[in-house]
Image (cartoon, coloured by chain):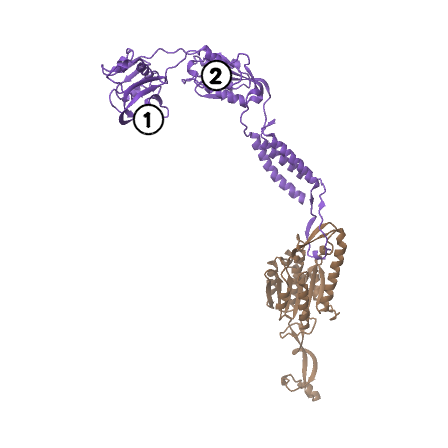
């Protein structure tokens, strides 16, 4: 057992010792008696007398000492740590869409985990498991969400800080296909907060699907047709339909199927549901990811001032923005597919549609729902930065910063015991006075 | 106070009397020998007829035998208005656990009232509580019950003096004071002396608890319940001095009250109340005045 704030326990011990001392040396006046004939007693000074130690006072003394120690121990925050081990392994298991076989990944993790080792399941979020890990691994299923190694690292760092007292050293293991989409700009800085190395266990990554065929439903002279690949067979699974008009209910139900993308991109001035007609103005550029297209676009439809998206739904994803930050294209999940609403007018004059940057913008707007996956393996440099030094996979627990101090359940129980002792002390005091 | 309500005390006092110690000057018919010469059958003497005597009281048979005109004198019985004055100050609530002094004092007061009522004397009670409670002397049937209720409703506390109650008992020809005399003893004695001089029979029942006589040798700080500022140590070292001063005070008290012409009795709470009542109402000769 250790204490978060041992000073309180020391202070309680000192107070208890003082109570024991006072119990023996305290003085008090003799007993009082109301006597009507008190006037006949001779006038003398009332002298205090030393209190004699009597066996009946032992109970009172014990209760008082226990009370003080209980309060002190409660304030000190006792922590009962499990038996200390040589090494604790924190396994970060990827279950994102990049994992080809979640079962195989689970087997890899199972081979690494020992009794008492924590497991972190992650995709775009992370879940820490410390109990019933075998059951969780047995039923592990992949998720259609892109993975984020940063999220797993943050959870691993917090877990390591919390369990640093359980082991002499801690080892981090990352079981993941290490796909390119799982590394973001924060990954390196978060990785640097871990002082040791990370064991990387690569599992098979999914193979990127072929590009979806795009079907443009518009007039023959639509300039957008010049930027799109040749149309595939209409209605085939995994199709991207680009409507140059507002969507009907039949179109929306079509987009409900898995892998289907319905891009609503009106060719003329029309206000899509959830948007509002605005005063026409000129927006100088559109930004979509790392694609920037500078052109005198005429903006006629605005997002209605709803930050989360024109429809107000929480799951809306902004794919492109005007140069002033207003949404220009959003993606709304519909069933297993999605509907993408684009308010960027395609100029009929000029050669903008022939600009490669505009072509890349169109590619972004016609990519599969959730964005195009990047399941390519991480570059060797990126892997090396993630793994860190090869020697030193085990990180000394002492070098890991401790977790924030917080109350333990023992403090509450000790406080309850202290309250009970208060009542017992009163009873013992009455008994001693009787 | 179950001793009062059980009826045992009144049963024990059945048949007891409280005769007047002096010739009564009462105007009402009663059981005491009056100084007035009345028309009761008990013959006293003949007196020669004088101008102003009622001619109907002339003993014509005597005149027939001796030719002397004389009137027949006889004793007249009169009632004695009796007031029992009871101290209900805080010192009477001693000991704190049993209140033996108050219980005994209340029993004595009830017993005296019952005995007086049994003699057809108007009896009342004055309780020096806060506020004082007075039941004027009555001879009606339920007056003893009224006295009992007044006693049951009283809790001894504070330091109410007895003197005002004695002062207000002007018409009573017999006054019994039941007290520990630790309060207004001096003015009470002065007033009692005047009462005695005026022909009132004054009985002083001085109540003492055995624990007051022997408080024990355990070292304690004793406090006057009527004067909390008075705190003194009382242990083995002080006990002898305490006993001596207390005894001296009681002796002086008895001497002063008896000297004032009152019938003084020091009684203990350890005694049975009915015995105390019989002792107070008995025919013991009062000490000569000035003794």
Q: Is residue A352 above or below residue B175?
A: above
Residue A309 position, x and y percent, is: 34, 25
Disc ID at residue A131? none
Residue A119 position, x and y percent, is: 50, 19
The answer, for residue A235, to whether it is visible in the render is no
Tell me the brown chain. Answer: B
Q: Which picture quadrant has residue B143?
A: bottom right
The residue drawn where x is 63% and y is 34% is A12
Q: Residues within 10 Å of mark 2 (few under 14, many from 20)?
A: many
Q: Is residue A28 above or below residue B82?
A: above
Q: Which picture quadrant has residue A52?
A: top right
Q: Secondary structure at mark 1?
A: loop
Q: Quadrant of the C terminus of chain B?
A: bottom right
Q: Is residue A47 above or below residue A353?
A: below
**Residue located farthest toward the bottom when viewing the structure as drawn:** B67
Q: Secondary structure at mark 2?
A: strand
Disc ID at residue A311? 1
Q: CA distance from mark 1 to mark 2?
A: 36 Å
Q: Residues within 10 Å of mark 1 (few under 14, many from 20)?
A: some
Q: Chain of mark 1?
A: A
Answer left or right for A27 relative to A266: right
Nearer to the camera, A222 or A193: A193
Residue B200 position, x and y percent, is: 67, 71
Q: Which picture quadrant has residue A55?
A: top right
Residue pointed to by mark 2: A93
- What colour is chain A? purple
């Amino acid at each position: 057992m250790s204490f978060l704030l041992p000073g309180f326990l020391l202070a309680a011990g000192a107070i208890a010792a003082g109570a024991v001392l006072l119990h023996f040396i305290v003085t008090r006046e003799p007993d009082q008696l109301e006597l009507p004939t008190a006037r006949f007693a001779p006038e003398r000074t009332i002298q205090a007398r030393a209190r004699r130690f009597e066996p009946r006072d032992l109970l009172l003394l014990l209760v008082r000492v226990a009370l003080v120690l209980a309060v002190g121990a409660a304030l000190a925050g006792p922590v009962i740590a499990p038996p200390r081990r040589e090494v604790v392994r924190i396994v970060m298991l990827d279950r994102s869409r990049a994992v080809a076989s979640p079962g195989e990944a689970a087997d890899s993790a199972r081979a690494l985990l020992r009794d008492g080792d924590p497991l972190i399941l992650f995709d775009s979020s992370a879940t820490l498991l410390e109990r019933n890990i075998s059951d969780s691994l047995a039923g592990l299923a992949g998720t259609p969400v892109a993975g984020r190694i940063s999220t797993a690292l943050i959870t691993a760092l917090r877990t390591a800080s919390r369990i640093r007292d359980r082991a002499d050293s801690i080892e981090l293991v990352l079981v993941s296909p290490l796909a390119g989409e799982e590394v973001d700009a924060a990954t390196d800085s978060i990785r640097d907060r871990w002082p040791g190395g990370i064991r990387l266990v690569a599992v098979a990554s999914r193979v990127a699907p072929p590009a979806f065929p795009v079907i443009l439903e518009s007039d023959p002279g639509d300039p957008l047709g010049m930027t799109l690949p040749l149309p595939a067979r209409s209605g085939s699974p995994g199709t991207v339909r680009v409507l140059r008009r507002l969507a009907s209910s039949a179109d929306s139900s079509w987009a409900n199927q898995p892998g289907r993308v319905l891009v609503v991109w009106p060719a003329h001035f029309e206000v899509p549901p959830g948007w509002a007609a605005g005063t026409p103005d000129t927006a100088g550029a559109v930004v979509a990811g790392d694609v920037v297209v500078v052109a005198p676009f005429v903006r006629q439809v605005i997002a209605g001032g709803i930050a989360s998206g024109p429809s107000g739904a929480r799951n809306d994803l902004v794919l492109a923005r005007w140069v002033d930050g207003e949404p220009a294209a959003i993606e709304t999940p519909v069933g297993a597919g999605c509907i993408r609403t684009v308010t960027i007018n395609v100029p009929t004059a000029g050669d903008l549609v022939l600009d490669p940057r505009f072509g890349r913008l169109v590619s972004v707007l016609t990519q599969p729902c959730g964005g195009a996956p990047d399941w390519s393996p991480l570059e060797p440099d990126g892997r090396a930065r993630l793994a860190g030094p090869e020697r030193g996979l085990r990180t000394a627990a002492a070098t890991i910063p401790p977790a924030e101090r917080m109350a333990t359940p023992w403090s509450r129980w000790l406080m309850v015991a202290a309250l009970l002792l208060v009542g017992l002390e009163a009873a013992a005091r009455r008994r001693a006075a009787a | 106070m179950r001793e009062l309500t059980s009826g045992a005390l009144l049963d024990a006092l059945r048949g007891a009397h409280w005769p007047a110690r002096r010739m009564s000057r009462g105007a009402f018919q009663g059981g005491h020998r009056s100084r007035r010469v009345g028309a009761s059958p008990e013959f006293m003497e003949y007196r020669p007829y004088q101008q102003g005597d009622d001619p109907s009281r002339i003993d014509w048979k005597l005149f027939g035998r001796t030719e002397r005109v004389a009137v027949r004198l006889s004793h007249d019985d009169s009632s004695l208005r009796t007031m029992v004055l009871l101290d209900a100050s805080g010192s009477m609530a001693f000991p704190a656990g049993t209140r033996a002094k108050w219980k005994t004092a209340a029993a004595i007061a009830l017993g005296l009232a019952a005995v007086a009522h049994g003699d057809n004397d108007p009896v009342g009670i004055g309780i020096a509580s806060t506020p004082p409670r007075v039941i004027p002397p009555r001879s009606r049937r339920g007056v003893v019950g009224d006295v009992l209720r007044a006693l049951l409703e009283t809790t001894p506390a504070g330091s109410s003096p007895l003197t005002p109650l004695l002062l207000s008992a002007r018409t009573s020809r017999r006054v019994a004071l039941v007290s520990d005399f630790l309060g207004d003893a001096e003015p009470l004695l002065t007033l009692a002396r005047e009462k005695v001089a005026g022909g009132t029979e004054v009985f002083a029942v001085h109540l003492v608890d055995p624990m007051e006589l022997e408080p024990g040798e355990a070292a304690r700080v004793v406090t006057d319940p009527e004067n909390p500022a008075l705190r003194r140590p009382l242990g083995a070292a002080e006990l002898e001095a305490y006993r001596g001063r207390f005894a001296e005070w009681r002796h002086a008290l008895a001497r002063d009250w008896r000297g004032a012409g009152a019938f003084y009795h020091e009684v203990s709470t350890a005694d049975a109340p009915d015995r105390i009542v019989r002792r107070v109402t008995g025919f013991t000769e009062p000490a000569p005045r000035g003794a």
